[in-house]
Amino acid sequence: MCGIVGYVGHRNARDVVIGGLRRLEYRGYDSAGIAVPGPEGIEARKKSGKLANLEAELEAHPIPEATQGIGHTRWATHGGPTDENAHPHLSQNGRVALVHNGIVENFAELRAELEAEGIEFLSKTDTEVAAQLLGREVAKGIDVSEALRNVSRRLTGAFTLVAFDIEDPSRVVASRRNSPLVVGLGEGENFLASDVAAFIEFTREAIELGQDQVVTITREGVEVTDFDGNPAETRPYHVDWDLSAAEKQGYDWFMRKEIYEQPRAVADTLLGRFNARGELVLDEIRISPEELRRINKIVIVACGTAFYAGMVAKYAIEHWTRIACEVEIASEFRYRDPIIDPMTLVVTISQSGETADTLMAVRHAREQHAKVIAICNTNGATIPRESDAVIYTHAGPEIGVASTKGFITQVVACYLLGLYLAQVRGMKYGDEIKSIMDELMGMPEKIQQVLDSIEPVMELAAQLKDEKSILFLGRHVGYPVALEGALKLKELAYLHAEGFAAGELKHGPIALIDQGLPVFVVVPPQGRDQLHEKVVSNIQEIRARGARTIVLAEEGDTVVEPYADLWFTLPRVSTLLQPLVATIPLQVFACELATQLGHDVDQPRNLAKSVTVE
Ligand code: AGP
């Protein structure tokens, strides 16, 4: 989704804004622009394509020195990725420049109102409507903060707006509804951005903003009100990572760096979860044990990779707590009139905490008086702020669009939630919980073990780079791992990849098996009822029809070896925890194959890191 930067301070605004947009590139975009106040009026430059095109434009047509400005990277929604549709948009009277993230749903009627007054639109965007409305307000002599409140009250949909008035350039204003915006607090300077990565090199002190709020930044300070002008409550916080965490540190891709950060990310997510009595504590869970004991159903809601983490969680949570646990795609959830009530615990999983589909599901759940726990990797994001409780994964910033450490730590957080519920409801004794936690504490080392022996996976990626289709099979918790492996390949290599429950193959998909077709199979640990034997039979079935079987199985599993054309060993772990090691080779495979194809692994085509539109 779009990246936004606003600045007022003592530095060269062009450097701060362009530098901030560069740190937001991972969000995915197809045009970029900047605007600063100049002696002759607003100076705006904007270009379709990547930031390099905007920088070339700035070389050809420099903007004047300024200490305030706004910038934007756009992921096209209304109107194609053209120069005209790029942000910032200026009002016809030349008073304001404005950038926007989100969708103004009632833009058509507002545009008609403005055209009837003689406003001529230069673009096809919903954003330009907000710019023209704001320009009309300040022309009435209303100060730009009040003017933005007036405009914001008229808009419906999801929006973050950032703007300035050329006649009052000492301030930059912004408003937000259902769309991310964070304030950076500096010395004699202040920042606005879609996320903290844009200003982290200048300050790690931030303010999270609430729904329907307008913020005004000047060199001296920050003022936050609601849309009616009443002073609003804000929550300052310290960002717990620094600029180096947002840099590549010598890796070719952020994604590869994040794959290798997974041992540490899991360790950090597990940190501090036990009290002196050896009991599991989840400090941000603001739901009482009594309320948790009354829960009779759990519904996990998420999108994409986060949804697959939820699928893994289902197996663990039901096994440990014996509470029925459903897993729902967020974009389907609220439209199917789900059966939820105050005895339902809704668990949302979101790395960014800004995914619109998941946010809308949270709101729907709360309207039905369900309790909502958010599992999130972004401090202060909208979803945890609108939930009853939160379990933060401590994976650090995940810049690569394809989620890796986000997924692994989401699974860990789901395990923690399952164990906590089992503890609170007396379904597991303390020693049983401790034994599972002890194995979890050993997982960073197991993940490192997989990474240390990953070379054959890299070689396989080079061998398979021209394949047109690759399948993934798994059973039990191996099934969501197969789905995640397929998604990684789709989003990075742009090739057909599909994950199946291995038992489903004979009900149709086995017709896809062709001579030499590569099929990854995630094999469960041995000794688990017939699960292992059933998967071995599935491997024999597809091999008999010509498949090239690429098997992920635990070390020492000699049963599966005769049926594996290629065999990657996994460290021996319990069945429910196997996704934490089985997923790693699939992440590396997708990253490497995409690299071999020359794709942009960190910013795959058509994708955005956080999908803040429904
Ligand atoms: C994962 O690789 C994808 N980029 C995508 O499926 C992502 O998991 C999904 O959009 C959910 O994002 P969230 O975790 O930030 O809510």
Image (cartoon, rainbow, N blue to C red):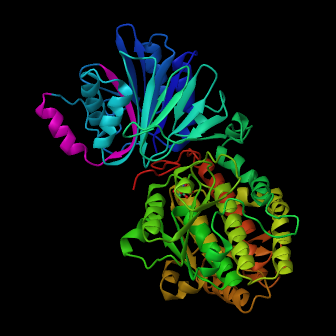
Q: Which residues are magenta?
A: 95-118
Image quadrant where one finds the C terminus:
bottom left
Q: Nearer the viewer, residue 271 or 32?
A: 271
Q: Nearer the viewer, residue 506 or 173?
A: 173
User: Residue drawn 45% across and 32% down?
Assistant: 72
- The location of residue 265, given as percent across then percent down, is 75, 54
User: Residue drawn 69% across and 60% down?
Assistant: 409
Q: Is residue 101 magenta?
A: yes
Q: Nearer the viewer, residue 419 or 218?
A: 218
Q: On the picture, is 373 further left or further right than 158?
A: right
Residue 43 in view, yes or no: yes
- The location of residue 164, given as percent across then percent down, is 40, 24
Q: Is residue 404 magenta?
A: no
Reply above or below: 278 against 376.
Answer: below
Q: On the picture, is 12 further left or further right than 475?
A: left
- The location of residue 31, given as percent across then percent down, is 41, 34
Q: Residue furthest front?
A: 230
- The location of residue 351, given as percent across then percent down, is 59, 55
User: Residue drawn 30% across and 44% down?
Assistant: 78
